[in-house]
Image: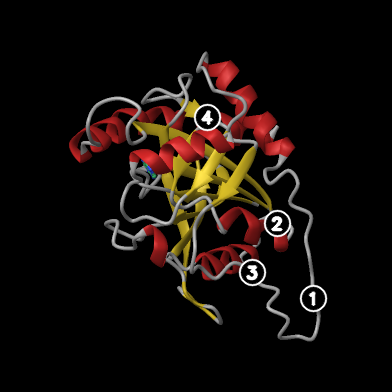
């Protein structure tokens, strides 16, 4: 079953999502960000979890990624599409761009990063050369083509810790490292999904130029305005992707 993890700006799928069940937040890794909703979106069965909780109460560095991914897997998720608001670093990533990253660099710290802590006496290293599912990325690309919606088909996502935005020097470093976009929630989510063998892709919505790329500072009002403007396109793309998965 497909699961959608909603990021900033995507806290619900709207009235056309018919909820059949609401799963408790408890896991042995702690509580998920919110109740996980199981239902049908225009007839298509899926799971939905808003990463920052209802009303955006959970900041990026406090998201219980392990609980979220574990609970989704327990409820039958075999595929996850993650929605992430990001800052644009390179010139092809102006605000309101939709991008499908194919690589990630993790600059976050202090987060629980793995299900394989060695507690069971085993050491496990999963392959993470290509962190995102080629199949799901292909479906999202095709959905974009169907809707005439331009998507940047390849990008490197730099994951910082937040909750503050980056300094200008940090963004210069990320750009030198090859990052095209920057966000705070891409990791360890993608790696945890890989550890549980759940197909995972990220659909990133650019909501601001990263620090120092344009202008003196990042305006939260502008970020929120761009989120509001872009989220309907994200939903349309997700619906088209669901139809493609169904057929
Ligand atoms: N940096 C990090 N995370 C973000 C940004 C940014 O500029 N915009 C949205 N999420």
Instruction: Tell me the crowding category of disc 4: few under 14, some 14 to 19, or many 20 or more residues within 10 angstroms, Cα based.
Output: many
Q: Position of residue 196 (x, y in %)?
A: 71, 63
Give the camera-side residue of 219 and 173.
173
Instruction: Tell me the crowding category of disc 2: few under 14, some 14 to 19, or many 20 or more residues within 10 angstroms, Cα based.
Output: some
Residue sitting at 41 percent across and 48 percent down? 7
**Label 3 secondary element:** loop
Judging by the rendered image, the residue that carries numbered circle 2 is 194
Question: Does residue 239 lie above or below 9 as drawn?
Answer: above
**Label 2 secondary element:** helix
Judging by the rendered image, the residue that carries numbered circle 1 is 123
Tell me the distance, in whole angstroms, between the alpha carbons under discs 4 and 2.
Answer: 20 Å
Instruction: Tell me the crowding category of disc 3: few under 14, some 14 to 19, or many 20 or more residues within 10 angstroms, Cα based.
Output: some
Judging by the rendered image, the residue that carries numbered circle 4 is 99
Q: Which tag, 4 or 2, sits closer to the chain's start?
A: 4
Q: Residue furthest left?
A: 221
Q: Which tag, 4 or 3, sits closer to the chain's start?
A: 4
Q: Which mark is residue 114?
A: 3
Tell me the distance, in whole angstroms, between the alpha carbons under discs 4 and 1.
Answer: 34 Å
Look at the image and tell me in which quarter the C terminus lies.
top right
Badge count: 4
Q: Position of residue 76 (x, y in %)?
A: 66, 61
Specify the quarter for ligand 1: top left
Q: Are marks 4 and 1 in contact (CB under 8 Å)?
A: no
Tell me the distance, in whole angstroms, between the alpha carbons under discs 1 and 2.
Answer: 15 Å
Q: Is residue 63 left or right of residue 113?
A: left
């Amino acid at each position: 079953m497909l699961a959608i993890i909603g990021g900033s700006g995507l806290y619900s799928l709207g009235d056309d999502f018919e909820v059949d069940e609401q799963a408790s937040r408890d896991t042995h890794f702690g509580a998920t960000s919110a109740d996980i909703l199981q239902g049908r979106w225009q007839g298509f069965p899926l799971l939905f979890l808003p990463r920052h909780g209802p009303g955006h109460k959970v900041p990026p560095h406090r998201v219980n990624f392990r609980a979220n991914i574990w609970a989704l897997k327990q409820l039958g998720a075999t595929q996850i599409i993650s929605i992430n608001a990001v800052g644009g670093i390179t010139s092809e990533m102006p605000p309101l761009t939709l991008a499908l990253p194919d690589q990630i660099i993790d600059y976050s710290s202090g987060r629980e990063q793995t299900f394989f802590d060695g507690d069971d006496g085993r050491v496990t290293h999963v392959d993470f050369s290509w962190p995102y599912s080629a199949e799901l990325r292909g479906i999202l690309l095709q959905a974009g083509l169907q809707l005439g919606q331009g998507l940047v088909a390849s990008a490197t996502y730099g994951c910082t810790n937040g909750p503050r935005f980056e300094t200008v020097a940090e963004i210069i470093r990320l750009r030198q490292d090859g990052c095209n976009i920057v966000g705070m929630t891409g990791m360890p989510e993608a790696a945890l999904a890989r550890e549980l063998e759940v197909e995972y892709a990220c659909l990133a919505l650019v909501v601001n130029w990263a620090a120092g790329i344009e202008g003196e500072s990042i305006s939260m009002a502008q970020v929120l305005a761009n989120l509001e403007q872009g989220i309907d396109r994200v939903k349309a793309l997700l619906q088209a992707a669901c139809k493609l998965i169904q057929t």
